[in-house]
Amino acid sequence: MFKKIKWLVHVTLRHAILGLRIKFLNLVFGMNIHPTARISLKAKLDLTNPKGINIGEGTYIAFGAILLTHDMSRNLTKSIKIGKNCFIGGNAIILPGVTIGDSCIVGSGSVVTKSVASNTIVGGNPAKVIKTGIKTKALGILVENDG
């Protein structure tokens, strides 16, 4: 019973902190992050052009992921957009100007250099299409087809 209560408090507290962080990023930095999105506390969001970060509902950004909206070597500042119900894996890097469609999964450690169509899994460096026609639910959890 104690373990259940401890787990419940941990999960509830964590979700509350993550929700407050999203509100803070939206209000203070002008980012456009949907309140149902979840971003790991160890994910890195570019504060050089914070208004260029757009994240849709039900999306999950895992630990160590980096979302860049500027590139000093090319003197480039561009927005990124991540659709709804996406999963961005740990240590993935999303480069400036990239749009990731709805229901996408970006593999851990991937470097996304080009936009990704909806309902797609990408992975690698540079990220390449692994599978298309997928479906995901909240937090980018893959929905398996029965056939």
Image (cartoon, rainbow, N blue to C red):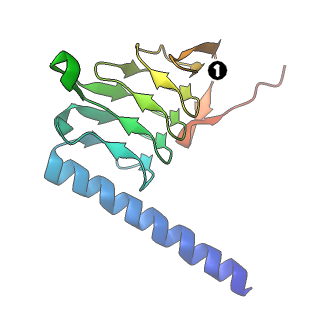
The amino acid type, in three-letter code, at marker 1 is: Ile
Q: Residue at x 55, y 68 (%)?
A: 11
Q: For residue 56, say whether it is visible.
A: no
The quadrant of the rendering that contains the C terminus is: top right
The count of marks equals 1
Q: Quadrant of residue 18?
A: bottom left
Q: Residue at x 21, y 31 (%)?
A: 52
Q: For residue 9, say whether it is visible.
A: yes
- Are there few (<14), some (14-19), or many (20+) residues within 10 Å of tag 1? some
The quadrant of the rendering that contains the N terminus is: bottom right
Q: Residue at x 17, y 38 (%)?
A: 48
Which residue appears farthest toward the right when viewing the image?
Answer: 147
Which residue appears farthest toward the front when viewing the image?
Answer: 73
Residue 61 in percent (x, y) is at: 46, 42
Q: Quadrant of residue 76?
A: top left
Residue 99 in percent (x, y) is at: 36, 20
Q: Nearer the viewer, residue 42 or 130?
A: 42
Q: Nearer the viewer, residue 130 or 70?
A: 70
Relative side of 139 to 141, left or right:
left
Q: Nearer the viewer, residue 54 or 130?
A: 130
Which residue appears farthest toward the bottom when viewing the image?
Answer: 2
Q: Is residue 107 above or below residue 114?
A: below
Relative side of 50 to 100, left or right:
left
Q: Which residue is mark 1?
A: 134
Residue 137 in percent (x, y) is at: 59, 36
Relative side of 34 to 108, left or right:
left
Secondary structure at badge 1 equals loop
Q: Is residue 56 above or below residue 110?
A: below
Q: Quadrant of residue 2?
A: bottom right
Relative side of 147 to 63, left or right:
right
